[in-house]
Image (spheres, rainbow, N blue to C red):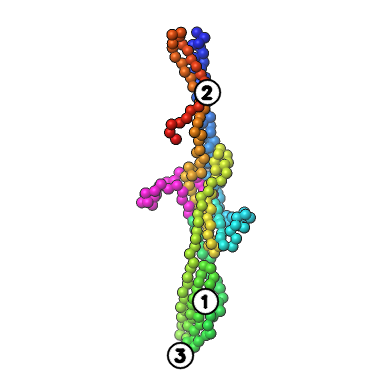
Amino acid sequence: MVTRLLVVALVVLGVLLTVQTCRLDRAHAATTREAYRADSLEAVNDTTRNLALTNARVAALLGDSLTAVQRRAVQTKQQKDALDVALGLERRAKVDLEARVRTLEAQVQGTTPTTETPEGVRSGTFHLEQPPYTVDATAHLPTPPTPGRLDVKVGLAPAPIQVRLGCGPKGDAGVRPAQVTVTGPPWLTLNVGEATQAREVCADDRRSWWTWGLFLVGGYGFEGWGGMAGLGVGVPLRR
């Protein structure tokens, strides 16, 4: 009789532990959802910031050759669009980026002496190098009232732009903030618009290859009912 009661008690204990584990899992899942909601709210309200103005180490690293901006990304499920379908790819992140080249303003002195034709057309050539622009121009000014003419060739240097998706340190419930960092030449004004990425990108899903567990064994033998309980280590056969 005592042995039978012991088996029943062990079974009840196992059920209670299972129920408690499920409750803890649900509580953790609820906490994680709230943490992601708070993270998304902060990301939506974030704006593009110049890292050189807020991080002295970054400013020293970039110097005068690069500019770097950063903005939080919303961690959410990615919705496939027509381009994703056409590419045949599973999108993990999407960032809207705006890059504007600064306005060219300059006063340039002629590179050669002014010339004048027998018809009275005066001409002058000009050259300007102001990154990212290279300008060569020739101005022709005939006698009034004939309108003048300007022959211009403008070259524009390529703009190397680099986009980095990074994950910050863990916050509440283990949620890591997602950051979009963009670097480019200083003559570009960079602005990060809407930025989203899948939660899995920054989710820390590393799990231990072993787990503790409670095992219960019961049965009926020659001497009646019997049971055994203990702790064991479980190793998954598939990751």
The residue located at (52%, 23%) in the rendering is 231
- Which of the 4 image quadrants contains residue 39? top right
Answer whether labels 3 and 2 touch (C-beta < 8 Å). Answer: no
Nearer mark to the viewer, of 3 and 2: 2
54 sits to left or right of 127: right
Amino acid bearing label 3: Glu
Q: Residues within 10 Å of mark 1 (few under 14, many from 20)?
A: some
Q: Quick one: quadrant of the C terminus?
A: top left
Q: Residue furthest right?
A: 56
Residue pictured at 36% horizontal, 51% vertical: 86
**Amino acid type indicated by mark 2:** Leu
Q: Nearer the viewer, residue 150 or 214?
A: 214
| C-alpha distance separating marks 3 and 2 | 106 Å
Left or right of 107? Residue 222 is: left
Q: Residue at x 47, y 70 (%)?
A: 155
Q: Which residue is mark 2?
A: 231
Q: Residue at x 51, y 47 (%)?
A: 74
Q: Amino acid at mark 1?
A: His
- Sooner in the amino-acid sequence: mark 1 or mark 3: 3
Identify residue for label 3. Answer: 119
> Which residue is under mark 1?
127
In the rendered image, residue 2, in percent from the top left (x then y), is placed at 52, 9
- Residue 44 seen from this side: no
Circle 2 residues within 10 Å: few <14, some 14–19, many ≥20: few
How much space separates mark 1 and mark 2, taking CA atoms? 83 Å
